Image: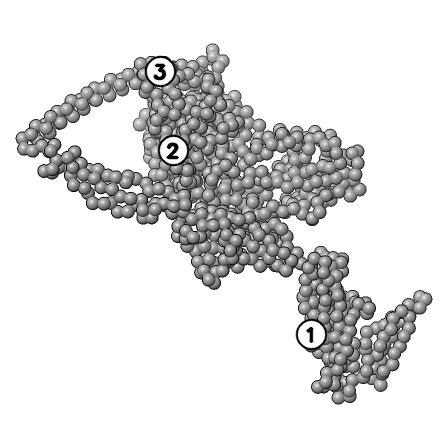
Amino acid sequence: MPLHLGPFVRWRSGLVLTWICLFSSGFTFTGGEHAATVTHPLPAAFSDLLPHFLVEPDDVYIVKNKPVTLTCRSTPATQIYFKCNGEWVHQDQHLIERDVDPATGLPVMQVKIDISRQQVEKIFGLEDYWCQCVAWSTTGTQKSQKAYVRIAYLRKNFEEEPLGKEVALDQEVLLRCHPPEGVPLAEVEWQRNEELIDPKTDPNFFITVDHNLIIKQTRLADTGNYTCVAKNIVARRKSSSATVIVYVDGGWSEWSKWSPCGADCTMWRSRECTQPTPSTGGKECQGLDLQSLNCTSEQCPQTASGAEDVALYVGIMAVALCLTLLLIVLVLVYRRKKEGLDADVADSSILTTGFQPMGIKPNKPENSHLLTIQPDLTTTTTSYQGTLRSRREVTGKFSVSNGPLLEPLPNGSHTLHNGKLPSDPNDFMNRLSSQTYFKTLPRDTVNTSYGTFNFLGGRLTLPNTGISLLIPPEAIPRGKIYEIYLTIQKKEDMRLPLAGCQTLLSPVVSCGPPGVMLTRPVILSMDHCFDACLENWAIRLKKQSYEGTWEDVLQLGEEVVSEPYYCQLEAETCRVFTEQLGRFALVGESLSMAAAKRLKLLLFAPAYCSTLEYNIRIYCMDDTQDLLKEVMQMERQLGGRLIDEPHVLLFKDSYHNLRLSIHDMPQAHWRSKLLAGYQEIPFYHIWSGSQRTLHCTFTLERQSLSTCDLTCTLCVWQVEGEGQSITLDFNISKDIRPLDSDFLLMDNCTPALAGPSAFQIPYLIRQKICSSLDTPCPNGADWRLLAQRLKLDRHMSFFASKASPTSVILDLWETQHFHSGNLNQLAAVMAEIGKQEAMIFLVSDGEC
């Protein structure tokens, strides 16, 4: 009798464990707690066949708490059972059905088992839950394919939601969508105004493999609310709606024909803004819709002819000649008076009063005289008081080039007190905000600096923000006095359009008033937060026009020296040379996934805690000083304090979210109230740069109020990217570390400085340096060598395009070294060039 290897039956009798093999004879054996039934023997003709599966178990998903059923069917089979994750399923959990194939006479067996959510959750996280069917015949065994059992879910929050856009007609639009995490993976569809978008019926739409929607060529009908819909067998989720507005800018029709010459010796023509007509917020046509032209004809009664024409033209020429001679006389008189005034100013104490040389001794004693000019040691003030304009000037002549911004000053004179203005700051902001262009200016004076400046220049600074405006000498025309402001715009208040992979990389900074006449570029300094690797970026300087639209005025790395804008890029700062004041921002577009932004990680907790709960807030924000200042001030109002030094994290354009988790807490004293293993900040929330103070909060609970020592590890990382591991170990009630003051970058500089006090280099010495180095020398001992020694030689073409290259180089040096500038170092550079005598005396042409 052949031996049948069926499943083992075991029972316990005392301490003895017995295994029994079942034989293929038709009898029943019962013992212990279980029973095994021996099947009927196979027909002799098929006794050597291995079993094969008619039905194998398939992968299934558990939805909510509903169990799933796995089915297996095999022939010829004498026994059939399931094993799950390597363990045999108990015999009582099998539902077995036996049958005989009428065509072959072979026995057929089918088995079913139910799998519950609790069974899967027991090993969830370690490995996938799987089950496999095993069938026996008299010849041997066969195993089915593995069937995986997974718990289905669909999270609520989209990893990236579409953002609204305003686009011109016939442009391409990309709406991004990254559905919530789910098992099985969610299917994505798009809706416009709650109606399904089907690219098959409307080929103007295209849905990419990564679920983004592309409108190939926008039409007016494409205006609407777009929603990304994600669904699987568990749930259906909708993203926030993104409003797409397709606007049409107006266009002119052709000019009409000229009208006949009228009685007033004028003919006219017109055109209409109808090709196309502006709609849905599009711009009106720019320019005139009516044009006139002087004409002569028989119909014009005022037309002169013959000898009368000659007399008329001779009379006009005589009048013009008289006016020209009179104008020349007036100009000569004015210039003589002006030269006398400038000489008085140059010889006055404005150039030296209050100048206090840097108290740093030079390394080489022989250079100690190079950058010194004898100051008036009898004065103790650092301000200038005196008349900057001729008293003969009438008040009506005080104006900004494009119209008076502020009221004229009385008596034709004005007094500067080192940038400290007598007017009230709130009054200044109210006057600015009353004008059309300045409606969007912030009304608070905390983030605004302003001052009154003339041809001697000055400096505006927003302390602890890294933002400043240098107004070089001679940038303001002589005889002009401007009241200039500098302020930060809150990003959430600005309508700065971003598309595709674009991201805001700097604060939005305003300086003005716009339209003032400048004879030299001023330098606007502001922080940026990208990795300064231009190979991975397309960085553009954007400026807001008077109409409110944002325009690209410069692409970094592709500067044109003839344009009114230029940029010096440093590791964390951008310095913009501009001949036009206005509102500026840096916007970047990643060219590869290696492009990275710098994030600043700040950890705060309550300065005083009297409850069992203890909150740790982690801010993940752009690495710029203005945001650091804003968060520090906000946390002080909330009663928070910095509990660890700031950390920097590179966040790449990889579309992966930022994750935060907390570990290694002493379980006996602390526990986290976070239900999930980690928190996430969606990628686009960070990459857009429009949300200033993104943060996550971890709520901890201590076992008793006497527990004050906290040790833990906080992990912050980008999925499949870089991360930071921050170890905390401190006493929550007795922490006396001075972190707040150490990392706020205490900048106590005066917000507004006017005249010589705003510069490291005295005015007269600056003039002598420029006179010495502007003239090219055959041996190269001129401004080119100065730029090389100061490591600014990559801007040679820009410097060369200016009337005084040396003055622009010194402007940039002043901007970079306002806080840490050492005149002795500059003196040493001048000595290396061989121009040490140029600090006091002008260099003659023969020395070149």
Tell which circle, 1 or 3, labels the residue nearer the N-terminal end.
1
Classify residue 272 by image quadrant.
top left
Q: Secondary structure at mark 1?
A: strand
Work out whether 192 lies above or below 693.
Answer: below
Assign a secondary structure to mark 3.
Answer: helix
The residue that mark 3 highlights is 412
Q: Is residue 767 visible?
A: no
Residue 638 sits in quarter: top right
Residue at 62%, 40% in the rendered image: 695
Q: Pointer 2: residues within 10 angstroms few (<14), some, or many (20+)?
A: some
Residue at image coords 50%, 36%: 493
Q: Is residue 515 left or right of residue 137?
A: left
Q: Quadrant of residue 521?
A: top left
Q: Percent from the top left, x then y, of residue 289?
A: 28, 40
In x, y percent, where is residue 34? 87, 71
For the residue carrying disc 3, how many other residues have a C-alpha within 10 Å: few (<14), some (14-19), or many (20+)? some
Among all residues in the image, which is located at the extreme top? 378
| Image location (x, y in percent) of residue 475 | 37, 27
Asked if one can make out residue 259 in the rendered structure from this viewpoint, the answer is yes
Amino acid type, residue under disc 3 in the picture: Gly
Residue reaching furthest bottom?
45
The circle drawn on residue 213 is none
Residue farthest to the left? 307
Residue underneath mark 1: 55
> Residue at coordinates 38% horizontally, 17% vertically from top-left?
409
Residue 44 or residue 747, whichever sits in front: 44
Q: Nearer the viewer, residue 702 or 539?
A: 702
Q: Which residue is mark 2?
A: 580
Position of the C terminus, as image quadrant, is: top left
